[in-house]
Image (cartoon, rainbow, N blue to C red):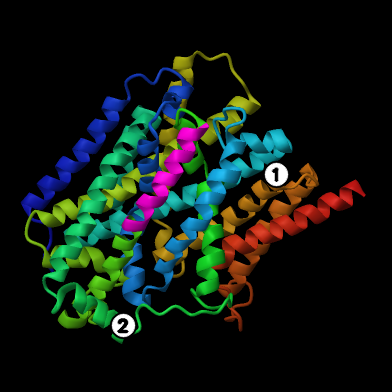
């Protein structure tokens, strides 16, 4: 197995140093919480759009997207179509709600609509979910670097976690956005380079990839709406739309970026720009899986041969075995770029939710602006340490990275989306209905997850609901029970 050359290490190190440098440079001027968490509310819509995209498409996307297509075919990739449903819905009907009072967090809306207890519940669920999500985002590049360098996993986890925590804590949102833009360009360019190299070694090039995909039915999509199928037409149009809404409309990671724009119109423009960025980025990411499938159809499957332990390692394996010296360092840096942008975005949003929804709301103090920013930096560091610790547990999750991450999003984010729907689109919902509806939705999904994974009974269930439907089911249960309990209270 070939590992990094000295040139690869040099290029990789230069990239990490540049990322930290951008973060440190951006630290200047963060004199208030508005500067630190919202970049002074003056970011251009194009920068906001690129930041949102970089934050949501992490090293998980970089590694797990191609790996999922490589193993299971293109079906899950069709979920990109759901962005054309979720984006207009968020832009036109949900985003204006966050701009009415110039909020710092998404969950301030829930306090105005319901009560402080609902705000704290929602913010707490967000903190729980994103901590787990960031752990997976930290684990993904560590897995790649372990494969290509031979370094132990614990070292590679600390390599990404410590550096990202450093520049995020110092630079705040301005550092996050500028490093996001840089990292998005690196990861897109890196993926494009992998595809070009692979196509040069496949008979027929792009036409050969297409012929192989069609001959082996890699582009097939079931037209059913069954909840038990892994991915089908119903999942693409319905379930994936709810999955995207969780991250676009209820997630402080995204909402915080909308609020960093200069106005509601700028924020809405950033979402439209992001929608058109998403298509080429996702087509390239998932299309890489088809290219790798065709490549190893000719050159021998490393997964079947036991050269890699799981499909999530297929991309770094290709990088280190097929590319000349220097390029592996650049492309592993691209994987780190994707993950560092996600981790930095998440850490800053976790800190903003903690400071604004809990610390400032429950025990307001007369601290100076300088002291408040200093406290926010230490909270960011604390979350960085927590995420690095959780990253060591990611390998225990069932399924590949795509399934694990989207299961977590659905388990916690589905009920949270239902909570926002109750607040934004119903007048009948009460605080009691919202609280109990959200909790019942979460518990119901958790029991379903435990049952499907044989934790409750020790036996495999006869019917298994696909991970992609969890967000929809959590939202639906929360809505139905929340309205029912609200009605009962008023009666």
Q: Which residue appears at 74% of the width and 38% of the height?
A: 114
Does the rendering let one see residue 150? no
The quadrant of the image that shows the N terminus is bottom left
Observer-nearest residue: 245 or 264?
Answer: 264
**Residue occupying the far right of the picture:** 491
Q: Residue 214: which disc?
A: 2
> What secondary structure is found at the residue carrying circle 2?
helix
Secondary structure state at the residue bearing disc 1: helix
Q: Is residue 343 above or below residue 86?
A: above
Q: What residue is rendered at 43% in x and 61% in y?
A: 80
Mark 2 is surrounded, within 10 Å at the Cα level, by few (under 14), some (14 to 19) or many (20 or more) other residues, namely few
Residue at 44% across, 45% down: 272
411 or 185: nearer the viewer = 185
Q: Give how far across and how far down residue 16 sits, in percent.
A: 21, 41
199 vs 342, left or right, is left
Q: Is residue 33 above or below residue 222?
A: above
Please provide percent x and percent y for residue 137: 38, 52
What stretch of residues is rendered in magenta?
A: 264-280
Of the two numbered discs 1 and 2 on the same chain, state the one appearing first in sequence.
2
Checking the image for residue 35, the label placed there is: none
Between 26 and 374, the one lying in front of the other is 26
Q: Residue at x 35, y 37 (%)?
A: 47
> For the residue carrying disc 1, how many other residues have a C-alpha within 10 Å: few (<14), some (14-19), or many (20+)?
many
What kind of secondary structure does the magenta stretch mostly adopt?
helix
| Residue 387: x %, y % from top left | 42, 46
Residue denoted by label 1 = 423
Counting the numbered discs, the total is 2
Q: Is residue 187 inside the magenta stretch?
A: no
Can you tell which quarter of the image residue 284 is in? bottom left
Whether residue 272 is visible here, answered yes or no, is yes
Q: CA distance from mark 1 to mark 2?
A: 46 Å
**Quarter of image, res 266:** top left
């Amino acid at each position: 197995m070939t590992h990094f050359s000295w040139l690869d290490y040099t290029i990789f190190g230069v990239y990490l140093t540049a990322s930290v440098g951008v973060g440190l440079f951006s630290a200047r001027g963060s004199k208030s919480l508005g500067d630190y968490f919202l970049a002074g509310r003056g970011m251009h819509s194009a920068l906001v759009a690129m930041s949102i995209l970089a934050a949501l498409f992490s090293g998980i996307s970089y590694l797990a997207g191609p790996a999922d297509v490589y193993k299971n075919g293109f079906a899950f990739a069709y979920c990109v179509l759901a962005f054309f449903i979720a984006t207009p819905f968020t832009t036109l009907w949900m985003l204006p709600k966050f701009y009415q009072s110039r909020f710092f967090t998404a969950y301030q809306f829930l306090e105005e609509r319901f009560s402080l207890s609902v705000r704290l519940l929602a913010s707490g669920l967000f903190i729980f979910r994103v901590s787990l999500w960031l752990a997976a985002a930290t684990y993904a590049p560590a897995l790649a670097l372990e494969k290509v360098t031979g370094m132990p996993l614990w070292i590679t986890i600390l390599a990404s976690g410590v550096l990202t925590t450093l520049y995020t804590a110092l630079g705040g949102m301005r550092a996050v956005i500028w490093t996001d833009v840089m990292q998005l360009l690196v990861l897109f360019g890196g993926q494009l380079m992998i595809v070009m190299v692979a196509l040069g070694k496949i008979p027929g090039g792009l036409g050969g990839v297409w012929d192989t995909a069609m001959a082996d039915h890699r582009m097939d999509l079931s037209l059913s709406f069954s909840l038990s199928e892994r991915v089908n037409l119903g999942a693409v149009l319905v379930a994936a739309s709810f999955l995207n809404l969780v991250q676009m409309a209820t997630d402080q990671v995204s909402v915080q970026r909308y609020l960093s724009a200069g106005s509601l119109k700028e924020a809405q423009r950033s979402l439209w720009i992001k929608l058109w960025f998403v298509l080429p980025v996702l087509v390239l990411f998932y299309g890489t899986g088809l290219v790798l499938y065709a490549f190893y159809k000719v050159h021998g499957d490393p997964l079947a041969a036991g050269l890699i332990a799981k499909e999530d390692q297929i991309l770094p394996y290709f990088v280190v075995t097929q590319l000349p010296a220097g390029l592996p360092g650049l492309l592993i840096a691209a994987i780190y770029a994707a993950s560092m942008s996600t981790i930095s975005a998440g850490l800053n949003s976790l800190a903003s939710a903690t400071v604004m929804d809990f610390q400032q709301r429950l025990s307001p103090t007369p601290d100076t602006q300088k002291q408040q920013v200093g406290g926010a930096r230490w909270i960011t560091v604390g979350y960085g340490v927590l995420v690095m610790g959780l990253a060591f547990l990611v390998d225990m999750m069932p399924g590949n990275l795509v399934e694990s991450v989207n299961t977590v999003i659905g388990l916690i984010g589905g009920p949270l989306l239902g909570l926002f729907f109750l607040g934004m689109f119903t007048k009948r919902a009460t605080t009691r209905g919202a609280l109990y509806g959200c909790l019942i939705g979460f518990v119901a999904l958790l029991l379903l997850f435990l049952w499907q994974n044989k934790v409750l009974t020790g036996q495999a269930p006869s019917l298994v609901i696909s991970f992609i439907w969890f967000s929809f089911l959590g939202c639906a249960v929360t809505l139905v029970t929340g309205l029912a309990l609200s009605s009962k209270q008023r009666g």
